[in-house]
Image: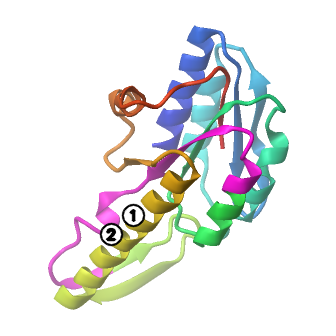
Amino acid sequence: MLADLAASLGYSAWRTGDPFGFVGFDREVRRDLYVPLTRLRGSGPDLARRLRALRPAGNAADGLLEAHRFLGRSRSLVFLASDFHFPLHLTERALTSFASHDVVPIVLWDPAEYRHLPRFGLVRFRDPETGRERTLLLRASLRQRIAEAFAERRAQLVSLFTRAGRPPLFLEHGFDPDRLTSYFFRGWTVEAGAHAA
């Protein structure tokens, strides 16, 4: 989803003549994924190829706190895309560091993590960032707890981002450019310049 989002944002920025940049992070800012502001046509597709080939190995998101240092000084539209499965205080601190920019929070979730679980049986869960796997006996009570935890997290993210100025867009079934467009047509304004973080 992130690769598709980056390709679309890069293309949209190029079509409108705006610069596009990207700052990836895990424990630290990922220099191998960094795209400085550019107006080159191929920057989005090139980044998307790198993201599709990426095999995440990090188990932290502390690099988010450094991402603002890679953004330009002028006010920009910053798409903050993540699953946000890290401590909320980290996101709050990052939003403070992005205060001079217009932040569009995009939450990337896979419904298989919490909505499309089997009713009962052994289930193998794999952490996409660390690659570690765990096998759990899924039963009704555990399935319910997982669903409730995701619902609570959704409410927390909606509250946090709305207080910061813009509610999040949840993407759960792949990237859909029409959903992103309709998100802005609900009353949110788009300013010149685009970054993805």
Q: Quadrant of residue 61?
A: bottom right
Q: Disc 1 and disc 2: Cα gap in Å?
A: 5 Å
Q: Does residue 147 lie above or below 68 as drawn?
A: below
Q: Where is 72 relative to 60, above or below?
A: above
Span highlighted in magenta in the image: 95-123
Q: Which residue is mark 2?
A: 151
Instruction: Please report the residue visible at 39 percent of the width from the left and 64 percent of the height from the top.
Output: 154
Q: Residue at x 65, y 13 (%)?
A: 41
Of the pair 127 and 38, the residue shown nearer to us:
38
Q: Is 140 inside the magenta-drawn segment?
A: no
The residue tagged 1 is: 154
Label 2 sits on a secondary structure element that is helix
Q: Amino acid at mark 1?
A: Arg
Residue 175 lies left or right of residue 60; in this view the side is: left
| Front-lying residue, 128 or 104 | 104
- Whether tag 1 and tag 2 are in contact, CB under 8 A, the answer is yes
Q: Residue 155: where, in percent of width, then height?
A: 39, 65
* Residue that appears at 36% across and 31% down: 186
Q: Which residue occupies 55% across, 27% down?
A: 9
Residue 96 appears in which quarter of the rendering? bottom right
SS category of the residue bearing label 1: helix
Q: Note whether residue 188 is visible.
A: yes
The picture places residue 188, in percent across and down from the top left corner, at: 46, 31
Amino acid at dot 2? Ala
Q: Is residue 58 visible?
A: no
